[in-house]
Image (spheres, rainbow, N blue to C red):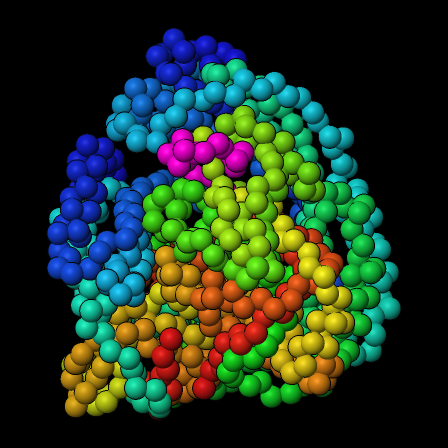
Amino acid sequence: MERALELAQKAGFSDFALKLVEVTNCLYTVARDSASSFKSWDDVWFAVYAAKDSKEVVFEHTKPFPSDPSQVVDEAQKRIEVAEPSPLYTPLESSEVYEKQNKLLEIENEIAELSERIHAKLSGKPEYVSYNTLSVWAQNITVKLYTSAGARIHEGYSRCWATYRAFADQDTTLQRCEYTDAPKKLKPEESLRSVWEDLKPALNRLKPERGAKSAILSPQVVGNLINSVGSASSAFSVLIGNSFLKDKNRVASPLFTLLDVGEGFPGMPHYDDEGTKTQSTVIIQRGELKNLLHNRKTAKKFGVKSTGNAGWISPSPWALVIEKGDAEYDELVRSLKDGYIVTNNWYTRFQSFVTGDFSTITRDVTLVVKNGEIVGSTKGLRISENILDLLSRAQAVEKRTHLVKWWEVETPVQAPHIMFEKVNFTLPE
Amino acid sequence: MEEPDFDDLKETIKLAYQELKSSLKKATLLQCFISVSWSKSHRTLVNSEGAYVNYTIPRVGEVAVFTLKRDDGLSLQKFHQREQEGGFELFQAAKFVESIKQQAIELENVLFNGKQADEGVTNIVLSPELTGLVSHESVGHPLEADRVLGREGVQAGESYASAQSIGVQIGAHNLNISDDPTIERSNGYYLIDDEGVPAQKRRLIENGRINEFLLGLEPAAVLGLKSNGSSRCSSYDREPIPRMSNTFFEPGDRTFDELIEEAKEGVYFKSFREWNIDDRRTNQRYVALVAYKIKNGEVSEPLLMPVLEVTTFKLLSSFVGGSKDFELYSGTCGKGDPGQPLPVSMGGPHTLFKGIKVGRR
């Protein structure tokens, strides 16, 4: 890598950065109570940022860094010849030197051990649970970042997440997920116990009702929707006009505070792709939009400092944290009186990222609350809303938060249950 | 396989942007993103069954996203994607520029002249773009054999179909939906799947009945069937699983005008933006981007975001017929854990459905 930087300097590049990433993965899945797959694989790629005369190029290859670094510099040269000067060009600056390799986990052995515990627990499932389907995924990630400004970052971190889905029948299902930084910290027995316990009151199936209803959205649902807010908070999205946060001030209820967290959140890096330290950034404070997420380029354009969220082209969130409130979950249910608890959702699709109009379909059961008590469950409801209008109708926030990451929550989220008023539910004919 | 001339390509993209902008009479262009891409994918497969497959698939594609706004704040956002198998010689700059421009003109017309749809039960005509999405989401996905067997339950979900569903009537008696990877130049084109099994056309729905699943070697063995060459993977280190290729309603015998005339009153859904479907693939919603009222058997004024929210079985059993014309739209299909995005296409003819509820956004 050092040699590539030398060659880049000789070739006249003003800025040059190389990022090498190696991810060791282990994934275990169970389908209908039987082991379905145990997969281990490595993802290896390198990415290049090069600038010359304010022209910039970024490219990456899913293979190890070549033994002959001149290939990489030659490719950068070839690509930059057809580029045009970028209005966002900002020289690399960070010369941070950092080396910290967390003790990498023996993830295959740890996942194998977990699988035994999972199957022991599954063998004692309650009678009303027909079967369970689940996945556990662990990653060891090592990143090397070398830049022409002098940054030499070499760090390693781990993360893992699990999704547990219990089926009473094909339409009466419930899901829990966990996210942490080591497989040993996962608690499959507790998660399965709680998902089974919470599935029991759902066995009383009730007819869904369309219309505006008070609703508690679970951390999984809040996590899914907040991923959209995280993307919209990228200054690049705002700059290209494709964000519902553009030119907005009050964007949510005063009960709602949202942060992006890099360092300090489980399984997150200490440095971004420009060598800037990752940090905690308040995006929304008590309902007001306070900050966008920046790399050095967007920060210069907006006249602020980088928030350590690079992306050489677009900044993006690391992990999203919603500040906890002051209500116990049971209090939320009581104060809901009559309404729904949406336990899970998927397929959140926007009619426009500029306006924030979207719909999302509930997945797994939606619990029905009457007179402050869960009386059964329903299925088939869809939420059709505007994301900012919805956030402005938050009525109460749970005092406990939960770590969420699964198929539909790509950026990890720490979120509480949140109660909203007048959530618009629709149904098919 | 031609490679692009970068300078020409830059000029084409700039021209598309300029033409789009200058075509607007009243709307403000809030944002615009235009890209053209090309790639080559090499695959070599050797297995213990004796298969040896070695091929290269070039691909060329285009994407445009733009948002138009009225002074009162109402805006509409278009997402256009087209991708096909072949080298850069397939990219026609003039056609690309004209297509972007025409889409902008049409969207502006809806934005300024679109009226709210009448809510209620009516007849609908779906364009090949919408027809294709229905075939992909409501028929292709639920008939993937691994989903049927519950293997995707924790991520992509399960299915309304079970192992015993072959032969079950789920649609009108003249409904035929297929998946065919052997269509040359299509986005889902291949001749041998990633387990070495020859590709073939799969008749998923025949005369309204579930006729076959999308099968790879493993689920076929579980079900006591033979693979129909549906297994694909996104990379050498991902497992091949049953996937769609080009999924479509089979064409019918009417012209588009005859279909509209037969509808008499209703809504013509031409393109969409917001859409979603539940994980068993029974409950879907499509919000139109461009739609028109059908009045006295003719396409009349534009409608503003009419909503089609309907179950799979209601929609498929309300099918009346399709037109002779046939078009495929490209897309990227997501499935699997780890995720395996793959190029596909979906389409068919214009299709008529009677007695369907239309709502408003």
Report whether residue B194 is seen. Answer: no
Q: Position of residue B145 (x, y in %)?
A: 56, 67
The dominant secondary structure in magenta is loop
Q: Residue at x 86, y 68 (%)?
A: A124
Q: Residue at x 61, y 74 (%)?
A: A215
Q: Quadrant of residue A220?
A: bottom right
Q: Is residue B144 left or right of residue B70?
A: right
Identify which residue, A58 or B314, lies in the foreground.
A58
Identify which residue, A389 or A32, lies in the foreground.
A389
Q: Is residue A307 magenta?
A: yes
Residue B192, placed above or below residue A216: above
Specify the segment rendered in magenta: A297-316
Q: Position of residue A111 (x, y in %)?
A: 77, 47
Q: Position of residue A411 (x, y in %)?
A: 58, 49
Residue B315, placed above or below residue A332: below
Identify which residue, B349 or A212, lies in the foreground.
A212
Q: How many numbered circles does the render carry?
A: 0
